Image (cartoon, rainbow, N blue to C red):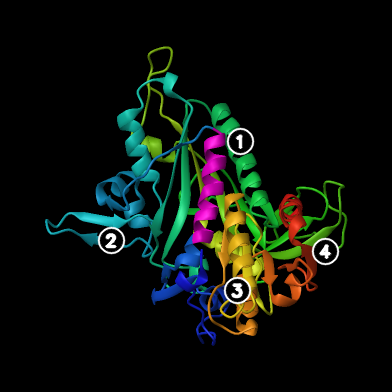
Amino acid sequence: MRCSHFLLAHLKETPSDAELISHQLMLRAGLVRKLASGLYTWLPLGLRVLRNVEACVREEMNRIGAQEILMPTVQPAELWKESGRWDKFGPELLRFQDRNKHEFCLGPTHEEVITDLARRELRSHKQLPIILYQIQTKFRDEIRPRFGVMRAREFLMKDAYSFHLTKECLSNTYQAMRGAYQTIFTRLGLQFRMVKADSGTMGGNLSHEFHVLANSGEDTLIYSTESDFASNINCPEVRHLKEGERSPDGEGILSIAKGIEVGHIFQLGTKYSESLKATVLNEKGEAPVLTMGCYGIGISRIVAAAVEQNHDPAGIIWGDALAPFQVIIVPIGFHRSREVQGISEKLYADLIQSGWTVALDDRAESPGVLLATSDLIGIPHRLVVSEKTLAQNSVEYRHRKTKQPQLILLSDLHRFLQAQLATS
């Protein structure tokens, strides 16, 4: 993408209502813009990051055999009344009537809709187990939207639902989903922990949360430095534990950190299938109620959590998996030097041909502005092309995580970048 034709909507000043660093940087870098309280437009740069998260989640869901569907955002009140949640869910459920005075809500979640689909489409035990998922917009009428897309009223979420005949079958799918979530957050380059959690309004008897470690998190976690042991510090079972002690599992030392919840998985049991009478015929010709699981990931929240975890005073620091572009070419003197322009154009075309996502900052701006932009938007690999570097048949390379640049021969550049991608 040529930056001269790209909507780089930077802000010089941080809006006064942006409290968290992720909110500040997502506004300053031009990832999002506020429309109203808790409502944000994703601009081209931010949408590229959001789509990268979606792609990773979609790949791992498909890998464990989940099937993608898309359900309506608008849901009829009848389903929520069947499940008993119409009155219990509270004011976060945005209710309204259509022109015929029929009641509806904007979906904050889709347990009722998916269970209605299951009772209509699933007939035999031979169709089980089955996992259905979607990546879709949700709406929760938060009393106090804040922190940008971290706690917005409208947000993008992956929600998956599984159906089973037995608890054992549900347990197997639950373990597969746990593994998929761990793979997703690892691929996205996030430091995270999984903790046992309260099922809350979703119901069920077992659930786990996935938290990205960040100083701005609203939850406090205690975890082992060398094992998978982790817990919310408010859990009665761990209140006696202290930071610096040996982990209860004997592996590693306990550490305390703040966490941002980005994923939650539930063993729902029969809470919704009983209410909505979702059954299938088993081998004996009986019609047992289906057992369900529910698995959510906050797609848009992951973007903000990643910024909270990866930034410095100059701006965002994206990893390769999340970055809107992997490489940015910054030509110094692009509009006055034919040599700089020619080499920059060739690099741009060659890298795209090699499969990289590349931004060429061909704007008529000063070197300081161009370099500051690349830092602010957080592109991992920066190549500076100038008459000075070309005099040495080289370009200046700097990874966003490092301070010192280095000269790379043009003849070695492709091999060097491939090595960088393999180790980042």
Q: Is residue 134 visible?
A: yes
From the viewer's perspective, is the residue at label 2 or at label 1 nearer? 1
Q: Position of residue 143 (x, y in %)?
A: 42, 72
From the viewer's perspective, is the residue at label 2 or at label 3 nearer? 3
Q: CA distance from mark 3 to mark 1?
A: 56 Å
Q: Is residue 144 visible?
A: no
**Where does label 2 land, which residue?**
95
From the viewer's perspective, is the residue at label 3 or at label 1 nearer? 3
Q: Position of residue 13 (x, y in %)?
A: 54, 87
Q: With 41 as the anchor, is 225 left or right in this view? A: right
From the viewer's perspective, is the residue at label 3 or at label 4 nearer? 3
Q: Secondary structure at mark 3?
A: helix
Q: Quadrant of the C terminus?
A: bottom right
**Where does label 4 land, which residue?**
243
Give the magenta-colored segment's residue range.
48-64
Q: Is residue 314 magenta?
A: no
Q: Position of residue 271 (x, y in %)?
A: 43, 40
- Is the residue under label 4 in contact with that under label 3 (CB below 8 Å)? no
Q: CA distance from mark 2 to mark 3?
A: 61 Å
Q: Amino acid at mark 2?
A: Arg
**Where does label 1 land, which residue?**
176
Residue 362 found in image quarter: bottom right
